[in-house]
Image: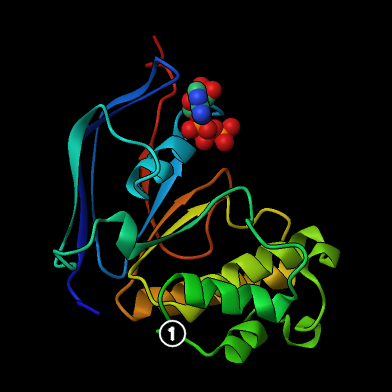
Amino acid sequence: MPSSCRLVGTRLTCERGGREVFRDVSFSLDAGRTLALVGPNGAGKSSLLRLIAGLVRPLAGTLTLQGGDDELSVGEQAHYLGHLDALKPALTVAENLDFWIAALGGGSGLSRDDALDRVALGKLAELPAQYLSAGQRRRLALARLLVVHRPLWLLDEPTTALDVASQGRLFELIAAHLAAGGLVVAATHQPLAVAYDELRLAGDTVS
Ligand SMILES: Nc1ncnc2c1ncn2[C@@H]1O[C@H](COP(=O)(O)OP(=O)(O)OP(=O)(O)O)[C@@H](O)[C@H]1O
């Protein structure tokens, strides 16, 4: 992985459903750093994450991952953990991770079993995902970030549904990713348990 990646957004403007959500948003995030997106409900935190992930097209502005892979888009170099955990309910916990590894073209991070251990799901590996609790589903979604390496993690309210112990493990995983030169952008209403810079979206630009 390039150790000197920098994510740069310049004068990004986003419209959804024909309404302006934010305008002229700029930021710069170095390797090993976390950017927390903060602001009231509807300010556009999730929209900005989805824009960085390549799921929403900016109306204006540019986004680049300097020092990244020129042949890949920013979204292709990112893991996006949204509100929906997007698991396959009929597959077991282990099969869900195998499916994910195959869908992304092979594992480049931890082994499947090591990733399950890191999120404390090793004992539930053979359980169909439909029987997982909300927090367990969230932890399985997190395990996907560990089996395929991507420098940029985009996390939407990452602590949702996690108990205190699971939140502790989440922040250990984030800290390890940052220590290895990764970058994290997180939309959050809660302070994060890692050092971070803040990007405040005002939520008053909607026309
Ligand atoms: N698919 C969509 N179509 C139209 N409008 C949308 C769509 N998704 C989001 N919006 C609108 O975009 C605005 C920003 O929503 P977004 O989810 O990005 O805010 P947020 O800051 O993440 O809010 P919250 O803190 O409630 O999670 C809101 O006004 C929302 O209604």
Classify mark 1: residues with Cα within 10 Å, few (<14), some (14-19) or many (20+).
some
Q: Is residue 181 left or right of residue 185?
A: left
Q: Quadrant of residue 152?
A: bottom left
User: Is 104 above or below relative to 17?
Assistant: below
Q: Quadrant of the N terminus?
A: bottom left
Q: Position of residue 90 (x, y in %)?
A: 77, 66
User: Is 49 above or below relative to 152?
Assistant: above
Q: Residue at x 55, y 50 (%)?
A: 82
Q: Is residue 139 left or right of residue 34?
A: right
Q: Which residue is mark 1?
A: 109
Q: Residue at x 66, y 61 (%)?
A: 87
User: Is 44 above or below relative to 167?
Assistant: above
Q: Position of residue 49 (x, y in %)?
A: 41, 45
Mark 1: secondary structure: loop
User: Is 55 above or below relative to 59?
Assistant: below
Q: Amino acid at mark 1?
A: Gly
Q: Quadrant of residue 142?
A: bottom right
Residue nearest the observer in this picture, 162 or 58: 58
Q: Is residue 82 left or right of residue 25?
A: right
Residue nearest the observer in this picture, 184 or 197: 184
Q: Quadrant of the C terminus?
A: top left
Q: Position of residue 75 (x, y in %)?
A: 33, 55
Q: Position of residue 11 (x, y in %)?
A: 19, 32
Q: Residue at x 21, y 77 (%)?
A: 3
Residue nearest the observer in this picture, 151 or 173: 151
Residue 163, can we see it? no
